[in-house]
Structures are given as C-alpha cells and as structure tokens.
Amino acid sequence: MAPHGGGSRLRRWGRYRPAARGRPCRRGGWWLALALALVAALAGCGGPPEPAPAELAAGAAATVDRLTSVHFLLTIEGGPAFLDQARMLNLRQAEGDLLRPDRSQATARVALGGLVVTVKFINIGATGYMTDPLSGRWGPAPPGLGYNAGYLFDKEQGVGAILRQIEGIGKAGEESIEGVASHHLTGELPAARLQVLTGGVIPGERVKVDVWAAKEGLSLRQIRLTEIGAAKTPMTWTLVLSRHDQPVAIEPPQ
C-alpha cells in the first residue's frame, strides 16, 4: 500500500516521464545548445584586438626601414612631372629596383613633345647615369636632370618618413594588392613634406595619402599621393612595391 497522500505528491512533484518507446530522450538538450553557442562566441572574439591605424602605419614604416632591396612601379596621372628645368621631359611612369645603401635603377616612360620615349637611369651614390632620350646611349646625367629612385629610401623625407607623419590617419578597409591581403589606411600631409619624394610637382597645399600594408608582416605594398582641391582631374602618384628583399645587382652602365 502506498503511503498516505503519496499519490497526490507524485502527481504534484513528479516530473519524470519515461520516453516513449522508439523515441530518444531529449532531456538536457538545451545544455548542449548553450555549450555550442558559448564555443562559437569565444571563437568569434578570440585573439588580440587589431592595432590602431597609426600603429599599423608605424609598423609599415619599420618594414621599409629594414628593406635591403625592393622592386617598384611608379605611375603618374594628371598634371605634368617634369624631370628637367626646361620642362621638356615629362615623367609618366618608372619601374626599377632600389638597393641599399645608395643604388637604384629605373626604366622610365617620358613624354617629350608629342612623343613618348623610354629613358633609363642608374644612380650609384652621388653619381647618376641616363640614356639619351633619342639615341638611347648611356652618359652622365646632366646636373638638375634625372630621376633618382633612391629618394624613396630617404630616412627624413622618403616613404618611411611619410608613413610616420600622416595626419588624421584612419582605416578605410581591407583590399588585395597584387594578390596580398592588405590594410588600407588613409590620411593627409602638407605637400611641402613630399618635396624630396615628388620634386614638389604635386600642386596645392595638401595631399591625400593612401597606404596599403600587408595584413601579415605589414610590408608596404602600395602608396598613393593625390592632389587635394584640384579644379579638374587631380594629380596622383601611385607607387607599388614588390619583390621585397630579393637579390638584385645594380652596376654602372657599360
């Protein structure tokens, strides 16, 4: 015989129900769902926070400082970038290599009147060489004429210095440059600070600076300088870097 009142107590408190035959018991399933949700949440917020844009730019500058060599492609659009005081040789594109401490070589596309000619440059220390725009023969670069890509490595006003001085820097997003996933940073600089790098040919008082640095290692992949406040098409300098620290030989022309 059941104890007095036992039946009603079981009806009131008893919560166990045997699983129906052929059906699995679902008791405790909500614990599993909660555990899975916590794992997903922890996975989503794992790892350290991303550095601030200024820290990313400083890291990219440090990689430039450590470079021993690099390949570059410079493209100029918009206004003219004359290489000579007579304003006849208008630089449109240059591609070549930089080798520390003081060597550079470049092949440039130059507008000369109504023609586009190829001119080559080699700089070793303070000595510069270039080919004649018409004959293609090598000779000394005349004073005040030439293109010295070595200025890109200048510690005071080169690319590394530009990265450290960008004002109002922010992150514009993430993009792929030459197949490399990169941070896209943006800001501005006074045009006067770009005097050595650009020869002072970008007009206006301020220049927009866009920087792309690899997400892994922060190697500098691309930098773009854009004239601010242009009435028509703004002048832009786009510099793409590749082959970081790859072997390269730069010798005087024969």
Image (cartoon, rainbow, N blue to C red):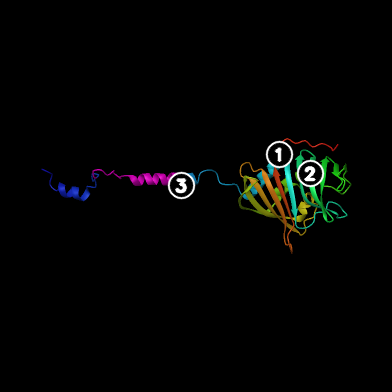
Name the amino acid type tagged 1.
Arg
x, y percentage for residue 190?
74, 56
Q: Mark 2 points at which residue?
A: 106
In this view, the residue in front, 232 or 52, is 232
What span is colored magenta in the figure?
Answer: 20-41
In this view, the residue in front, 98 or 60, is 98
x, y percentage for residue 197?
77, 49
x, y percentage for residue 91?
80, 52
Q: Name the residue under label 3.
A: 41
In the structure shown, which secondary structural element does the residue marked by tag 3 occupy? helix
In the structure shown, which secondary structural element does the residue marked by tag 1 occupy? helix
> Is disc 1 in contact with disc 3, using a CB cutoff of under 8 Å?
no
Give the Cα distance between marks 3 and 2.
Answer: 52 Å
Circle nearer the viewer, 2 or 1:
2
Q: Residues within 10 Å of mark 1 (few under 14, many from 20)?
A: few
Q: Mark 1 points at which residue?
A: 66
Q: Residues within 10 Å of mark 2 (few under 14, many from 20)?
A: many
Name the amino acid type tagged 3.
Ala
**In which quadrant is the N terminus drawn?**
top left
